[in-house]
Image (cartoon, rainbow, N blue to C red):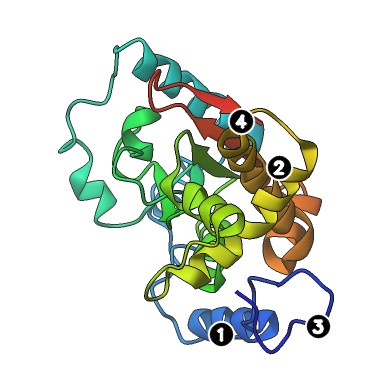
Amino acid sequence: MCDQHCSAGTEPSPFSISRRGLLAGGAAFLAAGTALPVGAPAWAQEGGAAAPNAISGDEALQRLLDGNARYVANQPVQKDFSAGRAARARAQYPFAAILGCADSRVAPELLFDQGPGDLFVVRVAGNFLNNDGLASLEYGAQFLNTPLIMVLGHSNCGAIDAAIKVLKDGVKLPGHLPGLVNSLKPAVEAAKAKGGANLLADATVENVRRNVRLLVTGDPVVSGLVKQGKVKVVGGVYDLATGRVTLV
C-alpha cells in the first residue's frame, strides 16, 4: 500500500500518518480533559491500588498462553460474561493487544480464554499493520498501558493465499482487495525466497514476523515503549484445526 512517502526501489511503508500529529493530538485530548483512561483511572480512586493490567509483558504473555492451553483442552474458565459489567463501564484495563486476522474462525477472546475488557483487539484480513490499526495499537500502548502486543496469524489464511495467487498466477482481484494484497506481498516474497515446501504456511509466519519487526523498529510510539521496557511485542500463529497458538 504505497503512498506518496514511498521512494523508488524501497519496500512500501504501510504508515503515512504523521507520528508527530498523532502524539500532539493525544496530548491535546489530555489537555482538554477528554475522558481517556489515563486521566482519572477508576483504580486510582480506590485506595491507589495497582491497575489490573499493571503487569510485565512476560506475565501478560504467560496469561495468554495459559488461556490458550485451557481452550485447547476445552476447559475454559470464562463463562459468566456479565460479571464485572458495571466496573467495565467505568474504565478498561486490557493486559494484551492483539493484531489479528478478520477471519471469522479466529476469535481472540475465545482462543485465549479471556473475558470482556481483557484484550484490546485490532483485526484486518491478513493481520498486517495499516495506518488505522497502528494508531489503535498506539492508543492501547500509550493510553491504556497495555504491556503486550501480539501479532496473531493463523493457518489457511485466505488473505495470504490470495496474495500468493496474485504473485504466482497473476490473478486479478476486484475493489480494494489489490491494496490489501500489496501489504502481504513482502511476506509471500520472503517465504518464496526460502524455498520451503508449504508456501502458505511459510508466508503466514513471515507475515507475522514482518509486522512484529515493523512495530518494534519502525514506529516511534510502540518502539519507544519497547525500548523503555514498558511494552513487549511477540508473534504467534493460531492453528485452526488444533486451536493451539505457537509463538514464532
Q: Nearer the viewer, mark 3 or mark 4?
A: 4
Residue 7 — which label?
A: 3
Please provide percent x and percent y for residue 32: 47, 87
Residue 175, x across and y down, in percent? 37, 76
Alpha carbon distance from label 3 to label 2: 24 Å
Question: Which label belongs to residue 25?
Answer: 1
Q: Quadrant of the C terminus?
A: top right
Q: Which residue is mark 2?
A: 191
Report helix, strand or loop for mark 1: helix
| Residue situated furthest right in the rendering | 9
Q: Residue at x 49, y 29 (%)?
A: 64
Which amino acid, by three-letter code, is at mark 3?
Ser
Q: Which labelled disc corresponds to residue 198?
A: 4
| Circle 2: residue type | Ala
SS at mark 3?
A: loop
Give the amino acid at mark 4: Asn
